[in-house]
Amino acid sequence: MRTRSQFGGFGSLPTLTWNDLKAIQEEIPAVRHAAPYLRTTAQVVSEEQNWTTSVCGTTPEYFEIRSWPMAAGAAFTASDVDTGGKVAVLGRTVVDKLYGPSGIGVLYADYAGYPEYRQLHPPFVHTVSVIDLLLNEGSQAHRYLKHSALARHGTGG
């Protein structure tokens, strides 16, 4: 939540709090979206490459404010923020520097509408990997998948 005229000096701390953000979002009708934004520079590393870049902490509203659609995959969600999910959105330059111009492919599935299964910590979160389903439901995991090879062939119990 910074305008072009609000820059802190080196080593300065943010002056707005999470309560300030909530108040802006809830009490100022003219503000459609507000998002925190904290930026630093860091070295990011893949198995064989590294690259120094800006690393930003924010919330999903930031992408709406900037009108930045995802070229591939999906942005992180409010649930990711609330649960402290370990997610990242990489820009094209970072992907190219870390993985080469051919890039890497990451596919995401939308699990909304799938039946809920037992998870370690409620409330149920749809935006987790299939590994979560396997660890929580074991051999019964196929019962929760819409397009399971096991379900199509009638095997797996």
Image (cartoon, rainbow, N blue to C red):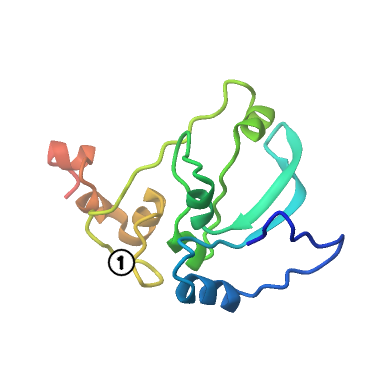
Residue that protrudes farthest toward the right in the picture: 10
- 84 left or right of 134? right
Determine whether, in the image, residue 26 is placed left or right of residue 48.
left
Badge 1 marks a residue whose secondary structure is loop
- Furthest toward the left, the residue is 154
> In percent of the image, x 35 and y 61: which residue is there?
136
**Which residue is at a point 45% across and 61% down the rendered structure image?**
32
Residue in view at x 35 percent, y 53 percent? 134
Q: Residue at x 54, y 64 (%)?
A: 84
Q: How many marks?
A: 1
Q: Where is residue 77 in the image (x, y as percent from the top left)?
A: 45, 56
Which image quarter: residue 147? top left
Residue sitting farthest toward the front = 30
- In the depicted view, which residue is nearer to us: 134 or 6? 6
Reading the image, the residue beneath label 1 is: 118
Task: Establish if 147 lies above or below 3.
Answer: above
Q: Which amino acid does label 1 sit on?
A: Arg
Q: Where is residue 124 in the image (x, y as percent from the top left)?
A: 33, 66
Quadrant where the image shows the N terminus: bottom right
109 or 24, which is in the foreground?
24
Question: 10 Å neighbourhood of mark 1: few (<14), some, or many (≥20)?
Answer: few
Query: Can residue 101 be seen in the rendering of this structure?
Result: yes
Image quadrant where residue 150 sits: top left
For the question of whether residue 83 can be seen, the reply is no
Q: Where is residue 31 in the image (x, y as percent from the top left)?
A: 49, 64
Of residues 97 and 145, the one drawn nearer to the viewer in this rendering: 97
Q: Where is residue 141 in the image (x, y as percent from the top left)?
A: 27, 53
Q: In which quarter of the image is residue 45?
A: top right
